[in-house]
């Protein structure tokens, strides 16, 4: 599904003394199957933005379209919208509530009145794709480890078979190995299911490694929208917004300042290894 | 400053009748000594016992077996608890859970007020603490309007106002943006250098541990690895992965292109690379 925001505005507490314009004139288009990262300082409007993506919040100005259909239209089927757009909120494991892992994951499909057997299949498939073994189906979700709980919570959203998956800091609080596992899993699910994925993150390293495109929120406005290298080339502006660039970009900048390499725009480990070892090889070749 | 002597801690779960259902050993005969003025980083996978360890330092938890002594006070003796909590303060992960008052100033005053410190002395301490974390100008504002990084600094000021010897940070940056993260780590280093406060920083972010005096890696309630950042990160990717860790990005890049020594910072990298090119 493609997503279009057209001049979206959102004001919290309109008419009260707490009135705050949380989204300011936001316009963008996300194509079907894209992998997009959203970054921004705390309070920049990221969460408000993603809550507009499945109609949890209704914009106070502008329009939101899915596949070119306006979701604020009375005829638009909101139930299907919530089914199509799955949001995994921060620390989703806090939302687990059922007595068993199986029941928790099946909660969504059951609410959609999907027949029993089909709901079971979806539950089974969702748990399989997050790497939770069948043997845990009847275990209480509260007996699982932190990383496992998070997987089960994500499976609950996947069981709805969403066409768009929005994740708010899915790796927060996990150790580096757990972090990589979760993000690899999300990338794999995106490939296999061919869905659109939107990843909200505070980690520049994760964004650099996984997404194709970055949107930068700042004080409620969409400040930048471009490819990973386009966005990370604007280091100064990002730092002023309380953000950063990946460690590799910082290092390449230092090497550039020292006059050792030319402006490369490199932000990944592989590229850095390739360019820096090539230069070492060239030098050794010349010395011989 | 902090001494753990063969500390074992068990979480005991009971069923409805009160019978023991299961026992999880979170700390397993842990022994450790932290000197005054040290900056310690604690790493380890989820569930390795890091937070249980931290909660023993200011007597939020007490050992099932063994002994924890903080600044000369044994944590198992209830008469010592106030003294220990004043000397060892703790900053938690979620900034929103630590705000108790309506203004920044009142929030910072909460600790010293409970200690029964006279008003004018308290005001002095609060102002001083807020200046130290760079939030003096915001002292009359509502803490709820601050950013995540600022809220964490209010929490730090609240501890500073109690004049602690030691601050324990339990994943203080996990929920912050990069700017907030940088600020908190810098503040911790500054308090360590300028005021000689002992810092214990629990984190999953390898980059944050590079400036520590010593890294402790925990695994199943025990210390699996221990040493300076250079000693720990030179163990190589495979070993660290076993403990849920990674090598810092810069170190990994240096290892991949074959630069000598264990490189931790960008400055070291640039120097070593220039040398390799000569």
Image (cartoon, grey):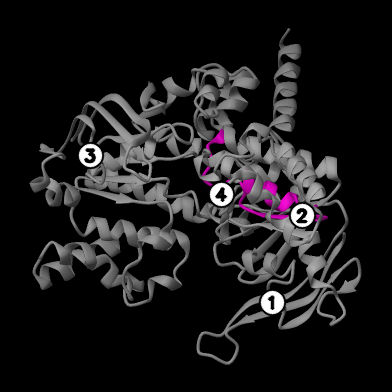
Query: Secondary structure under badge 4?
Result: loop
The earlier-in-sequence mark between 1 and 4 is: 1
Asked whether A209 or B217 is in front, the reply is: B217
The earlier-in-sequence mark between 2 and 4 is: 4
Q: Can you identify the residue that label 4 sits on?
A: A99
Q: Can you identify the residue that label 2 sits on?
A: A160
Query: Secondary structure under badge 1?
Result: strand
The residues colored magenta run A152-176
For residue A24, the mark is 1
The earlier-in-sequence mark between 2 and 1 is: 1
Categorize mark 1 by other alpha carbons within 10 Å: few (<14), some (14-19), many (20+). some
Is B10 situated above or below A21? Answer: above
Label 2 to label 1: alpha-carbon separation: 31 Å
Regarding residue A52, the answer to whether it shows in the image is yes
Q: Can you identify the residue that label 3 sits on?
A: B62
Chain letter behind tag 3: B
- Kindly indicate whether the residues beneath marks 3 and 1 are on one polypeptide chain: no
Query: Secondary structure under badge 2?
Result: loop
Q: Residue at x 42, y 45 (%)?
A: B171
Residue farthest right in this picture: A68
Categorize mark 3 by other alpha carbons within 10 Å: few (<14), some (14-19), many (20+). many
Q: Residue at x 32, y 37 (%)?
A: B19
Q: Nearer the viewer, mark 3 or mark 2?
A: 2
Chain letter behind tag 1: A
Label 2 to label 4: alpha-carbon separation: 20 Å
- Kindly indicate whether the residues beneath marks 2 and 1 are on one polypeptide chain: yes
């Amino acid at each position: 599904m493609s997503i279009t925001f057209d001049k979206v505005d959102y004001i919290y507490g309109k008419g009260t003394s707490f009135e705050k314009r949380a989204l300011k004139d936001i316009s963008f288009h996300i194509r079907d199957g894209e992998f997009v990262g959203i970054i921004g300082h705390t309070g920049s409007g990221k969460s408000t933005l993603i809550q507009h993506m499945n109609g949890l919040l209704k914009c106070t100005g502008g329009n939101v379209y899915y596949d070119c259909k306006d979701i604020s239209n009375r005829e638009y089927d909101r139930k299907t919208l919530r089914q199509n757009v799955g949001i995994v909120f921060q620390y989703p494991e806090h939302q687990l509530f059922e007595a068993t892992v199986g029941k928790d994951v099946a909660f969504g499909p059951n609410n959609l009145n999907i027949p029993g057997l089909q709901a079971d299949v979806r539950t089974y498939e969702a748990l399989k794709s997050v790497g939770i073994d069948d043997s845990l189906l009847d275990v209480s979700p509260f007996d699982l480890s932190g990383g496992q709980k998070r997987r089960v919570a994500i499976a609950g959203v996947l069981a709805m078979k969403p066409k768009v998956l929005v994740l708010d800091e899915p790796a927060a609080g996990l150790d580096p190995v757990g972090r990589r596992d979760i993000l690899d899993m999300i990338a794999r699910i995106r490939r296999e299911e061919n869905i659109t994925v939107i990843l909200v993150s505070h980690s520049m390293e994760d964004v650099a490694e996984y997404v194709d495109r970055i949107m930068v929120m700042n004080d409620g406005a969409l400040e930048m929208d471009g490819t990973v290298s386009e966005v990370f080339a604007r280091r100064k502006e990002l730092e002023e917004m309380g953000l950063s660039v990946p460690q590799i970009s910082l290092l390449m900048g230092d090497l550039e300042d020292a006059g050792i390499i030319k402006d490369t725009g490199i932000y990944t480990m592989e590229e850095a290894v390739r360019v820096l070892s090539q230069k070492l090889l060239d030098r050794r070749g010349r010395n011989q | 400053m902090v001494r753990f002597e063969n500390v074992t801690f068990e979480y005991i779960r009971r069923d409805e009748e009160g019978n023991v259902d299961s026992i999880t050993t979170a700390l397993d005969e842990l022994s450790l000594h932290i000197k005054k003025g040290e900056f310690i980083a604690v790493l380890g996978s989820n569930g390795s016992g890091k937070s249980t360890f931290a909660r023993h330092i200011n007597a939020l938890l007490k050992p099932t077996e063994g002994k924890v002594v903080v600044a000369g006070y044994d944590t198992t003796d209830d008469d010592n608890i106030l003294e220990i909590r004043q000397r060892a303060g703790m900053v938690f992960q979620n900034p929103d859970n630590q705000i108790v008052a309506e203004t920044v100033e009142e929030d910072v005053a909460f600790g010293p007020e409970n200690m029964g410190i006279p008003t004018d002395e308290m005001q002095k301490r609060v102002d001083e603490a807020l200046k130290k974390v760079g939030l003096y100008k915001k002292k009359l504002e509502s803490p709820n309007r601050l950013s995540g990084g600022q809220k964490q600094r209010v929490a730090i000021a609240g501890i500073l106002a109690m004049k602690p010897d030691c601050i324990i940070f339990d994943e203080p940056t996990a929920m912050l943006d990069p700017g907030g993260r940088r600020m908190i780590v810098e503040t911790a280093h500054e308090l360590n250098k300028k005021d000689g406060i002992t810092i214990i920083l629990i984190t999953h972010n390898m980059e944050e541990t590079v400036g520590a005096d010593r890294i402790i890696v925990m695994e199943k309630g025990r210390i699996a690895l221990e040493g300076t950042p250079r000693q720990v990160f030179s163990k190589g990717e495979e070993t660290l992965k076993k403990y849920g860790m990674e090598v810092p990005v810069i170190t990994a890049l240096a290892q991949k292109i074959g630069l000598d020594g264990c490189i931790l910072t960008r400055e070291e990298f640039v120097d070593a690379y220039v040398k390799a090119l000569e």
